[in-house]
Image (cartoon, rainbow, N blue to C red):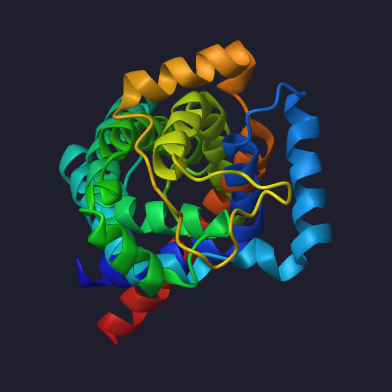
Amino acid sequence: MAVHMVAGSFAGVVEHIAIFPLDTIRTHAQSRGSRSGLSSASFDTAVDLVSKRGSTFLWRGATALAWAVVPAHAALFSTYETIMDLGLPGRHNNNNNSGQKVAMVGFLAGSLSGMVHDLIMVPAETVKQRLQLGYYQNASHAIRRMARNGGHSFYRSLPTSLAMSIPYSSLMMASNETIRWYLNPSGSYSLPTFLLAGAVSGGFAAAATTPLDVIKTKLNTQGLKMAKTSTGELNAAPRKFKVKYEGFVDAYMAVARSSGVRGFFRGVGPRVLQIGPSCALSWCAYETAKKFCTTAWHE
């Protein structure tokens, strides 16, 4: 358990920080209400942000995740490993398990570990997305102002986040475990296997859950006006904040009315480009750290 928690924490830092600029572009693309094409919306957003605020702005909000990434991913990977070990005894020492059983246990492990992860990460994700839009001076400023308004914003997107995270984690881990089982049934350490399985499973699950991610972003960033530079009132707390969407249904109807079906896939490009590689890096970092910690532990 200790090894899984340490390795999971390391993997979480690598996953969230390595491709953070793409996450910023995704947040802005989803917050916009234009009807332009999916690819052009993301490209225009990137050009707009870099030209108006500089490339360093793409990293704004990264520190907001620092306090949550370590415990969230420690809990995620330790839960995942526990369920996989219970469902597939001796999974690293033999290849007697069928591909179907591996996928089913992976699906269950993804569901439960994703839920544990989101209970910790949702407040940090809300603060991060608001900072990405240009509001507040820093994470501490955002937390204080949001708490002063009652603190409801921290968890308003939790039901939608869970509705997205559980399918995402289930699909990602089920497909990841299945691909790894076919490519490397012995379960031995193999970076090429981890990279390929992580990238394919992460990109697939990211694309499939993009509509829910759009709704989550709407809930997290509602009431924040988008300035011409798409960076809000830079460093300022939003004035006269008003709740526009109480929950999933309100946000869903708003996206459907303003952009139709296309609106639910806004930001899908940056999301897949972000999560596919970050998932691959995360699994490589996790398995490498686990191997190192296991060796050190036994020595």
Image side of residue 256 versus residue 266, left or right? left
Image side of residue 105 versus residue 290, left or right? left
Q: Decide which of 15, 195 is in the foreground and name it.
A: 15
Does residue 16 appear in the picture of this structure? yes
Image side of residue 141 versus residue 26, left or right? left
- Image coordinates of residue 146 in percent, x first then y, are 31, 58
* Residue projecting furthest to the left: 86
Asked if 255 appears above or below 299 in the picture, the reply is above
For image coordinates 41% across by 30% down, the residue present is 171
Asked if 122 appears above or below 286 in the picture, the reply is above
* Residue projecting furthest to the bottom: 299
For image coordinates 79% across by 60% down, the residue present is 52
- Image coordinates of residue 173 in percent, x first then y, are 39, 38
Q: Decide which of 286, 139 is in the foreground and name it.
A: 139
Q: Decide which of 239, 188 is in the foreground and name it.
A: 239
Q: Quadrant of the N terminus?
A: bottom left
For image coordinates 42% across by 62% down, the residue present is 12
- Image coordinates of residue 191 in percent, x first then y, are 58, 58
Does residue 90 appear in the picture of this structure? no
For image coordinates 33% across by 84% down, the residue present is 296
Image side of residue 265 versus residue 128, left or right? right
